[in-house]
Image: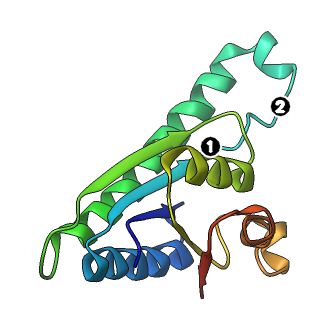
Amino acid sequence: MFKHILLATDGSPASEHAAQLAVGLARTHGARLTAVYVVDPYPYIGVGEINPMGFQAYMSAAQQQAAQAHAQVEVLCKQGGTPVVLQARLVEDVGAASGIVQTAETEGADLVVLGSHGRTGIARLMLGSVSTKVVAESKVPVLVSR
């Protein structure tokens, strides 16, 4: 049924559960799996121009977190039965929801899988603002994992 699954990952516990579901679905359907990590835009506009080290430190930390999140998914892909081939994507300079939806479109995914709550602080008070936006904006089905 599914040929290409897009997994939105950020390394959070909800994201790990979503990864387990996405890998299982990919294995069951023989689908391709793409894991996307979206780096939020640098939050301190103007400061980066004065202190470029702040921006560089921010991006370095984000890239390390992305690598860790992708590594967690890769471990799941190699466990169990048939290995699942994983493509890892890093998207920068766009909000998380937009990055996920845009990547689903450009990659040709026919299902998006993501956790109900991610890494953000105050936004976690609601049903995950990112997951809500992805459900509203996506042109393909979205599976939200709790």
Residue type, label 2: Tyr
Residue underneath mark 1: 39
Q: Quadrant of the N terminus?
A: bottom left
Residue underneath mark 2: 44
SS class of the residue under badge 1?
Answer: loop
Q: Tell me: 28 left or right of 145.
A: left
Which residue is outermost to the front?
1
The residue at the point 43 percent across, 57 percent down is 35
Looking at the image, is mark 1 or mark 2 earlier in the sequence?
1
The residue at the point 49 percent across, 78 percent down is 18
Tag on residue 115?
A: none
Q: Is residue 10 above or below residue 15?
A: above
Q: Tell me: 14 left or right of 5.
A: right
Q: Position of residue 36 (x, y in %)?
A: 50, 52
The residue at the point 50 percent across, 41 percent down is 90
Q: Position of residue 104 (x, y in %)?
A: 57, 54
Which residue is outermost to the left?
81
Dot 1, crowdedness within 10 Å: few (<14), some or many (≥20)?
Answer: many
3D distance between C-alphas at marks 1 and 2 = 14 Å
SS class of the residue under badge 2?
Answer: loop
